[in-house]
């Protein structure tokens, strides 16, 4: 009898693992169904469907949350914990049990009715925003935003005590980060960025009129999709559609979709939005298929996710080498507009540094200042230092102080981002700058491993870079905490130096900054 006990124990563990994965897949399927409805609302849904859509998504999210906090799930995880601790730390099963336990302990603190209420509210708020922004009607959004602020504080209260009311939101997006650590990171970066921005903006502005001609929408769409596919976006497991605010969404390992928007008078808008979202999608498509349907089958954090969108959009997509290959093709498509524009002029135009009003139009240098502004306003609203009705003027004052310009209306001010109108206030923006910092660190590590990557990019070949990212980053999904994953991939925790070196090298050359201005 004793000799057969280990075999029975193994069978028991195997049955428990099967049951755990079944339960987790059911939660994943409910989340995916909600995401399908969200994608539809942001792309093709008629306006009349808004009320029902909010109710439908609220019901699905409530059901998913109820399953995520079932006592039976908790007992399964408890029963498997010791088994998982005896496995190699990085094994799929050990990681699944560890992450499932973390998620369960977090989810049981959140009431199901809160999940239902916020989902319904965010759906109606987003719909109202799609009309308020073009109408420059912030007053319409004040009650929505006040309700969002209340719900954001309510969510944080589920995790009290905490050092700052924003900390639960920040940790959800970027595990291990806090309001204090993000503020410290931003302070360090701002000291380096402001002198560079000032030195460049004091020069005559780069000419980007070649980007601001009439470019037919269909041709822009086709070229953007072609570029995304060249980078490695698998269109057999995805698609590209139009929306108000571009995003990427994952329904399964075989269905990762991206969206873009097109401005007929701005060639860069659709192109770089598409490359950005393709970066997100390639991350999701590169996750090991064995992790699909579990909490491990998704990107590990918003910051790491943004590192991929910013890497492919900026480090690759705005590089000289990228356009040595793609620019002749773009010129053939838009011969009338670009045949007389040299590559050097085009490259300088897509890397123009200028103080601008719109975050998504901002260059790599000033972009981070936009993020810091929003992060600071989030903290002030959550702390009660800033009332929602005073947000427009606070926005203008911060823009004047940080960027030297201010919007004349709210359309280009506090209404420009969908984030606060479709989700919580708090933890919504810091990930973009974390992503910028990590993008350079990951790219530097890939170059160290494969020095020929730059040469390949100039030939329109991205296999070595994509493969390194897949093997060192993508395939792991959420198996490792963000800091752990960064260290495993690059040999170091998140560092500022690779990003600063990248910026100084690139923009020092483009704008002939004097030696020594990078320190």
Image: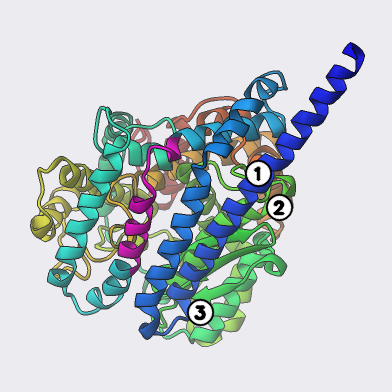
Q: With 202 as the anchor, is 261 left or right in this view?
A: right
| Magenta segment boundaries in residue numbering | 106-123
Mainly helix, strand or loop, the magenta region? helix
Rate crowding at label 1 as few (under 14), some (14 to 19) or many (20 or more) other CA atoms within 10 Å: many
Q: CA distance from mark 3 to mark 2?
A: 25 Å
Secondary structure under tag 3 reads helix
Secondary structure under tag 1 reads helix
Residue at (9% x, 59% y) in the render: 389
Q: Earlier in the sequence, mark 2 or mark 1?
A: 2
Q: CA distance from mark 2 to mark 1?
A: 15 Å
Q: Looking at the figure, which quarter contains the N terminus?
A: top right
**x and y percent of residue 346 in the render?**
47, 67
Residue in the foreground of this view, choosing between 479 and 18: 18
Residue in the foreground of this view, choosing between 100 and 177: 100
Q: Which residue is mark 2?
A: 456
- The mark tally for this picture is 3
Q: Which residue is mark 3?
A: 338
Q: Earlier in the sequence, mark 3 or mark 2?
A: 3
Q: Tell me where residue 218 sits by quadrant.
A: bottom right
**x and y percent of residue 372 in the render?**
27, 45
Q: CA distance from mark 1 to mark 3?
A: 33 Å
Q: Which mark is residue 325?
A: none
Taking the magenta stretch, the answer to whether it contains residue 110 is yes
Residue 229 seen in render: yes
Mark 3 or mark 2, which is nearer to you?
Answer: 2
**x and y percent of residue 317 in the render?**
54, 58
Q: Which residue is mark 1?
A: 469
Residue at (65% x, 20% y) in the render: 82
């Amino acid at each position: 009898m004793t000799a057969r006990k280990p075999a029975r124990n193994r069978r028991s563990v195997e049955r428990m693992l099967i049951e755990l994965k079944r339960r987790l897949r059911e939660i994943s399927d409910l989340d995916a169904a909600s995401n399908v409805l969200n994608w539809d609302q942001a792309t093709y849904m008629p306006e009349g469907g808004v009320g029902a859509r909010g109710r439908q998504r609220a019901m699905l999210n409530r059901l998913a949350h109820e399953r995520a906090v079932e006592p039976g799930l908790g007992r399964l995880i408890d029963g498997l914990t010791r088994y998982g601790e005896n496995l190699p730390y990085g094994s799929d099963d050990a990681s699944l049990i560890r992450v499932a336990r973390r998620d369960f302990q977090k989810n049981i603190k959140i009431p199901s009715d809160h999940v239902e209420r916020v989902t319904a509210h965010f759906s109606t708020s987003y719909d109202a925003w799609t009309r308020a922004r073009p109408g420059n009607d912030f007053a319409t959004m004040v009650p929505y935003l006040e309700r969002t602020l209340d719900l954001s504080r309510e969510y944080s209260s589920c995790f009290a005590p905490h050092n700052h009311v924003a900390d639960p939101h920040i940790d959800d997006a970027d595990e291990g980060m806090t309001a204090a650590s993000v503020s410290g990171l931003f302070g360090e970066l701002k000291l380096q960025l402001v002198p560079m921005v000032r030195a460049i903006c004091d020069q005559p502005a780069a000419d980007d009129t070649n980007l601001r001609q009439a470019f037919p929408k269909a041709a822009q769409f086709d070229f953007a999709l072609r570029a995304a596919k060249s980078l490695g976006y698998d269109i057999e497991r995805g698609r590209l559609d139009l929306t108000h605010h571009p995003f990427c969404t994952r329904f399964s390992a075989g269905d990762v979709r991206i969206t873009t928007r097109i401005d007929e008078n701005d060639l860069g808008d659709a192109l770089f939005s598409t490359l950005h979202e393709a970066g997100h999608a390639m991350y999701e498509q590169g996750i090991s298929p064995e992790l699909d349907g579990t909490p491990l089958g998704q990107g590990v954090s918003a910051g790491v996710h943004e590192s991929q969108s910013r890497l492919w959009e900026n480090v690759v997509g705005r590089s000289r080498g990228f356009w040595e290959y793609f620019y002749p093709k773009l010129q053939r498509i838009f011969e009338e507009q670009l045949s007389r524009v040299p590559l050097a002029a085009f490259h300088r135009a897509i890397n123009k540094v200028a103080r601008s009003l719109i975050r998504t139009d901002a260059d790599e240098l000033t972009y981070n200042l936009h993020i810091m502004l929003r992060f600071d306003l989030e903290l002030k609203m959550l702390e009660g230092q800033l009332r929602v009705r005073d947000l427009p003027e606070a926005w203008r004052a911060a823009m004047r102080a940080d960027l030297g310009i201010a919007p004349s209306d709210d359309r280009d001010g506090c209404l420009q981002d969908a984030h606060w109108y479709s989700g919580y206030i708090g933890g919504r923006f810091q990930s973009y700058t974390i992503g910028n910092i990590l993008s350079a660190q990951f790219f530097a590590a890939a170059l160290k491993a494969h020095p020929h990557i730059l040469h390949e990019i100039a030939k329109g070949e991205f296999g070595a870079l994509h493969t390194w990212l897949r093997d060192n980053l993508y395939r792991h999904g959420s198996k490792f905490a963000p800091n752990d994953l960064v260290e495993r991939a690059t040999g170091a925790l998140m560092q500022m130096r690779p990003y600063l070196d990248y910026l100084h090298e690139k923009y020092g050359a483009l704008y002939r900054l004097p030696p020594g201005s990078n320190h």
